[in-house]
Amino acid sequence: MTGARLAMALPGDHRDPERLVQTIREHQVTTLHFVPSMLQAFMAHPQVESCNTLRRVVCSGEALPAELAAQVLKR
């Protein structure tokens, strides 16, 4: 990812899917890192579909449920 910019959410924003959606759209984020439990909360937000710049999601720290991975891949 040479030449990429780093956009970091403000403290606490990682717990607020609506604010994350706003940040992703504002900064045209292409890559996200989540623990699976936070990814699940994020994916439940109705505006996730508007994050059309996303190209990859990285998960670590917990087991990633297969159904959550499939949900992310469908979007």
Image (cartoon, grey):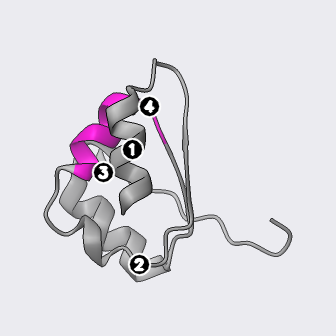
Circle 1 is placed at which residue position? 70
Tag 4: Cα neighbours inside 10 Å, few (<14), some, or many (≥20)?
Answer: some
- What secondary structure prevails in the magenta region? helix
Location of residue 12 by image quarter: top left
Circle 3 is placed at which residue position? 13
Residue beneath the point at 38% across and 78% down: 25
How far across and down, in percent of the image, does residue 49 sit? Answer: 27, 71
Q: Quick one: 53 or 9, which is closer to the camera?
A: 53
Tag 3: Cα neighbours inside 10 Å, few (<14), some, or many (≥20)?
Answer: some
Tell me which label, 1 or 3, sits earlier in the chain: 3
Over which residues does the magenta segment extend? 34-43
Give the spatial CA distance, label 1 vs label 3.
25 Å
Q: Is residue 66 visible?
A: yes
- Tag in front: 4 or 3: 4
Tell me which label, 1 or 4, sits earlier in the chain: 4
Give the spatial CA distance, label 4 vs label 2.
21 Å
Residue beneath the point at 33% across and 48% down: 71
Tell me which label, 4 or 3, sits earlier in the chain: 3
Residue beneath the point at 64% across and 64% down: 6
Circle 4 is placed at which residue position? 35
Q: Which SS class for mark 4?
A: loop
- Residue flagged by tag 2: what amino acid is it? Asn
Give the spatial CA distance, label 4 vs label 3.
14 Å
User: Magenta stretch containing residue 56, yes or no?
Assistant: no
Circle 2 is placed at which residue position? 52
- Tag in front: 1 or 3: 1
